[in-house]
Image (cartoon, rainbow, N blue to C red):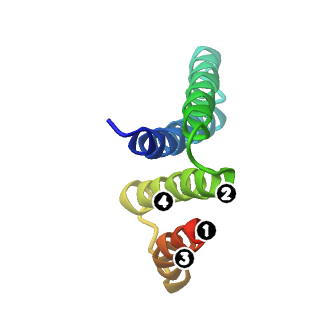
Amino acid sequence: MNTYVISFIAVFLSGFFNFCAGVSLKTSVINKSRALQLYKYIILGVLFYGLAFIFYYISLKKLSIAIAYSLGTATTIFLLTLRSVIFLNKSITLTTLLGFIMIPIVVLMLTWE
């Protein structure tokens, strides 16, 4: 498999695990009344952040930091927004939609030299 493909997969996995860490830590704040649940979610959050860092490191072997960071952050924000729409009944605003449309355009602009 091409090393650039592996780098892109790694950056998306980094964003996914960053999303998982955020959800775990947010859940620990919500469930603060149960001490055992609190520690379980905090440990999961730290493990997910560790996995996110490892995949981010792998992605930086072939991708520039500007592309890797923007794609990883965009993946995290997209997944958090999707979770909010599905589970928390939030609505997508025009600003959010325009932001998601602009992400691939900006990444393409970063690749032009």
Q: Quadrant of residue 2?
A: top left
Q: Vertical placement of 104 versus 42: above or below?
A: below
Inter-mark Cα distance, 3 to 2: 17 Å
The residue that mark 4 highlights is 78
What amino acid is labelled 1 in the image? Answer: Leu
Direction left: furthest residue: 1
Contact (CB < 8 A) between labels 4 and 3? no
Does the CB distance between marks 2 and 1 fall below 8 Å?
A: yes
**Quadrant where the N terminus is found in the figure:** top left
Q: Which mark is residue 8?
A: none
Q: Foreground residue, 93 or 48?
A: 48
Residue 68: x, y in percent?
59, 50
Which mark is on residue 99?
Answer: 3
The residue type indicated by label 4 comes to Phe
Instruction: Tell me the amino acid under the disc marked 2.
Output: Ala
Label 4 crowd bin: few (<14), some (14–19), many (20+), radius 10 Å? some
Q: Residues within 10 Å of mark 3 (few under 14, many from 20)?
A: few
Q: What element carries label 3?
A: helix
